[in-house]
Image (cartoon, grey):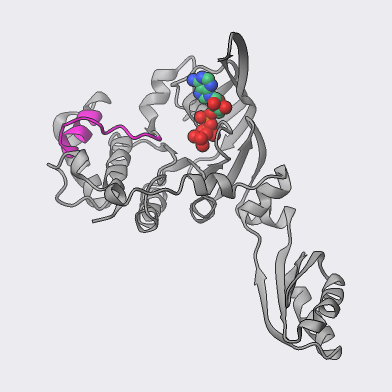
């Protein structure tokens, strides 16, 4: 469905009087199969939106080629546009028209008849949980409803490939979870291929068959979430020791199966490659040494651990900075 080779996008930016070239996307290869849901992850400014704009024909690549839905994004851009849906980061529903009319107009732009677009639009309103909102102006909808209206617009012409740029940014957790359901449903019900960008690690994890991580314009990883986690870090095992004086002893035992062992108060923790296998032996070892535990916790690695291992930086800051939902506009009704 998507096949990109050596995609590059450079921008000219000014720094005082000097012109500087920004290499926003720097040699990106992508392969996305039909029916896949791919999460495109990366911190602010990594190049996600720029890549998406090239794949959706809105921006001509400086270098490289891409075929999307079977057509070249430069030579056959009209064919590509006909086959894809694109829901941009900012959304597209700023007008004073009523929600239903906007969706129908959008369908007609793609060559649908008014009757066809109305029928399909009403179906989408049902599927996307927008009951009774056909005649409401987008500005009178909640943030979650507006985002779903954006998605209805992106889907009206029944694309087989949908690009979603940060579909849930600015929504509260409940509205996000609700939208996740709808995105999962896109594939389940319609067999659609979905390519979505996000800052949210849990979102990428929950929705995607495969994760592609971009940093500084380059792909740094592409695999299933499980494989990525298995490759780069072990499970975190945290022991809470009953007698704080025995923590150092517990840490020594932990070191026989773990790496990066640290001690904090009555806790000793470390990374263990296969915790499920290693923990029973560790517990026996601790028992034999008369070290009692208050608790033991095993935490699976997160995508943030993956990113940290790959780049030495955390994605969490980027995630936190975009988690400012506006309660006035984003509450689900
Ligand atoms: N029109 C432009 N002119 C100059 N620089 C640009 C332009 N568009 C993007 N950039 C720069 O290109 C880089 C990649 O931007 P892009 O928007 O693709 O990142 P992103 O990963 O989508 O970020 P975010 O998550 O914040 O949306 C950034 O350094 C950005 O400042």
143 and 129: which is toward the camera: 143
- Relative to 301, say whether 168 is above or below: above
171 and 328: which is toward the camera: 328
Which residue is depicted at the point 85% across and 70% down?
Answer: 255
Is residue 51 visible from the viewing direction of this image? no
Choose top left, top right, bottom left or bottom right for residue 257.
bottom right
Q: Does the magenta portion include 235?
A: no
Which residue is depicted at the point 50% across and 16% down?
Answer: 60
Residue 292 location (% of width, % of height): 76, 88
Residue 148 location (% of width, % of height): 30, 45
Q: Is 60 left or right of 88, judged from the image as shown?
A: right
Segment colored magenta: 89-107
Q: Does the magenta portion include 100?
A: yes
Is residue 210 visible from the viewing direction of this image? yes
Q: Is 173 left or right of 270, judged from the image as shown?
A: left
Q: Is 19 left or right of 200, judged from the image as shown?
A: right
Residue 264 location (% of width, % of height): 74, 70
């Amino acid at each position: 469905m998507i096949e990109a080779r050596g995609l590059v996008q450079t921008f000219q930016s000014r720094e005082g009087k000097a012109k500087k070239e920004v290499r926003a996307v720097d040699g990106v290869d992508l392969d996305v199969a039909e029916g896949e849901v791919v999460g495109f992850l990366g911190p602010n400014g990594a190049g996600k939106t720029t890549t998406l704009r090239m794949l959706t024909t809105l921006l001509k690549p400086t270098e490289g080629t891409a075929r999307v839905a079977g057509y070249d994004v430069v030579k056959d851009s009209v064919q590509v546009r006909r086959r894809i849906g694109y829901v941009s980061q900012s959304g597209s529903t700023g007008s004073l028209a009523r929600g239903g009319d906007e969706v129908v107009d959008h369908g007609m732009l793609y060559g649908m008849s008014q009757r066809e677009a109305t029928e399909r639009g009403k179906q989408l309103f049902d599927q996307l949980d927008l009951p009774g909102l056909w005649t409401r102006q987008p500005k009178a909808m909640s943030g979650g409803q507006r985002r779903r209206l954006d998605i209805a617009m992106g889907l009206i012409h029944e694309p087989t490939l949908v690009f979603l740029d940060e579909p849930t940014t600015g929504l509260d957790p409940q509205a996000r979870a609700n939208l996740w359901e709808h995105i999962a449903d896109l594939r389940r019900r319609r067999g659609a291929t979905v390519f979505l960008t996000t800052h949210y690690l849990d979102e990428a994890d929950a929705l995607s068959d495969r994760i592609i991580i971009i940093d500084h314009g380059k792909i740094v990883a592409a695999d299933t979430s499980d494989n990525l986690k298995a490759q780069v870090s072990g499970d975190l095992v945290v022991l809470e020791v009953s007698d704080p004086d025995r923590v150092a002893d517990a840490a020594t035992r932990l070191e026989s199966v773990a790496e990066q062992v640290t001690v904090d108060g009555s806790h000793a923790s470390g990374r263990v490659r296969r915790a499920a296998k290693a923990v029973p032996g560790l517990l026996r070892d601790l028992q034999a040494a008369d070290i009692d535990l208050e608790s033991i916790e095993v935490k699976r690695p997160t995508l943030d651990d993956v990113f940290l291992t790959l780049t030495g930086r955390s994605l969490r800051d980027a995630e936190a900075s975009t988690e400012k939902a506006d309660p006035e506009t984003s509450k689900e009704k």
